[in-house]
Image: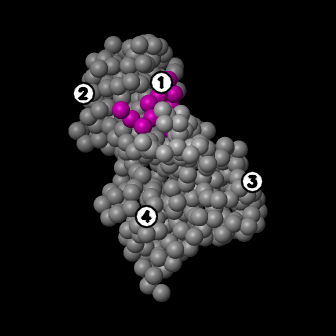
Amino acid sequence: MTIKAYMHELGSAAKLAAKRLALSDLSRRNDALKAIATAVNTSRQDILEANEQDLVKARANGLDAAAIDRLTLDDQRLDAMIASLQQVMTLADPIGRVDQVQPMPSGIRVGKMRVPLGVIGIIYESRPNVTVEASSLCIKSGNAVILRGGSESFFSNQAIARCIQSGLVAANLPEACVQVVDTTDREAVAELVTMNDYVNVIVPRGGKSLIERVAAQATVPVIKHLDGVCHIFVDETAETDMAVALVLNAKTQRYGTCNTLETLLVARAVAPSVLPPIAAALEAAQVELRGCEETRLLVKECRPAHEDDWYAEYLAPILAIRIVADITEAIQHIEHYGSHHTDAIITQNHGHAERFVREVDSSSVMVNASTRFADGFEYGLGAEIGISTDKIHARGPVGLEGLTCQKYVVYGTGQIRC
C-alpha cells in the first residue's frame, strides 16, 4: 500500500470513529480513559523497554541533551501520564453545553452549543508522553485523532498506542478514535496536513523547523506556536529572594521545554543588588550567562550577548541577561524580541503588575510566578494538546475547550420571519 493510500485509510476510519465518539456518553469516554490509565500502569515494563530502544538509537544518532531529556521515560513520567489521564477524567464534559441563550424580539431564543472539531491530526517530536496526553484530550472532547510521532520516539509511541487501543476496546469505542501512524516516512506528514476531506485541524508540536514546515505545507487549519522566547522582568520593587528562586526555577527546572526562561530583564535601579545573587545561583547550576555590557560589569563571568541572543530559544543551560531602564523598556524589549509565548514580571508594585498584564501581548502573562507554569496540567486542563500563540479560537495551552467549537442553536415556538 502506498503512503497516500495508507494515510487516507486512516483518515476515513477516523472520520467514521469521530461521529460515534461525538455521540457517546461521557461515562463511556471516561471509562476509556480509566482503562488506558490501567493499561499504561500494567504495561510499564514494555513501555520502558521500548523507550530504551529509542534512547539507544537517539544516542547513536547524536541527539542533543535537551532532545534526549524530552524523549526519556521513567516511572515518574509514567506516573505523570496516569495522573493526567485521571485529571482529564474529572473535567466537565465540554460537549453539548449550550451557553448564552438569549430571547430575541421575534420570540426565538438563540444560544451556542459546544461541539467537537471532528478529526485532529497531531505531528510531534521526541516526547512520547504527548501520545497519551493528546489522546486523552481528544477522547474526552469527542474528537478522533491521528498521531504522527517522530522517528526518534517510534518504539515508545507504538507501545503506548497499544495501551490506548486496549482502553478503547474495553470501553466499547472504535479503535480508530486514536490511530498512531506506524511509518516514519515524511510523506505521511505531507499527506496528513493536506487531507481536508478527513482532518479538521492540525497541531504540530516540536521544534521551530518542524512547525514552520507543517504551517507552510498544510491546507488544513493549524494550531501552533513557533518558539518559546520567554522573559522574566525583575522590576525595581522585586524581592531579591523571590527573584532568585523564580529565575532559577524558570531556567533550570527543565531546559528543553517551550516555557523555559530564555531572557532575563532587570531594572537598572536594582541590578547591582539583584543580579549578583541571581547570577551566583545560575552559575552554581552550571548555566552559561550571556549579557549586555552593563550586565558584564556586575557579573564578571558573563559572556557578551549579541543581537541573536535576544531572539534565541536556547533549550539549553544558557541565559541571556539585559539591564533595562524601567518597565517601559522591558515591555518594548519583549514586544520586539519575544515570541508571544510566556512572559513574567517580578514585582511588589500593583500598578506595574497590572500594566505588564495589560500591555504584554503573549498567550500567558504572569506575575510573581515561574514561566514553567505555562502548561495545560498546571492550568487545570488535565493536559494540553499544545500551546497556541496564534490569535484564533484557542490561545495559550489548548485543552478540552480549545478542541471544540460552537454552533448556533435556535429554539422557537412556531415563529416565522416577517
- Residue 173 or residue 324, whichever sits in front: 173
Asked whether residue 332 appears in the rendered view, the answer is yes
C-alpha distance separating marks 1 and 3: 38 Å
Q: Quadrant of residue 159?
A: bottom right
Task: Tell me where the magenta segment starts and ends, as one range.
Answer: 361-375
Quadrant holding the C terminus: top left
**Is any part of residue 53 visible from this angle?**
no
**Is 200 included in the stretch rendered in magenta?**
no
Residue 62 disc label: 4
Q: Which residue is pictured at 52% across the width and 60% down the height? A: 118
Q: Are marks 1 and 3 in contact (CB under 8 Å)?
A: no
Q: Earlier in the sequence, mark 3 or mark 2?
A: 3
**Residue linked to disc 2:** 293
The mark that comes first in sequence, 4 or 3, is 3
Q: For the residues marked 2 and 1, what is the alpha-carbon distance in whole angstroms?
A: 27 Å
Mark 1, residues whose alpha carbon is within 10 Å: few (<14), some, or many (≥20)? Answer: many
Q: Please state which amino acid type lies under the numbered disc 2.
A: Glu
Label 1, on which residue?
Answer: 367
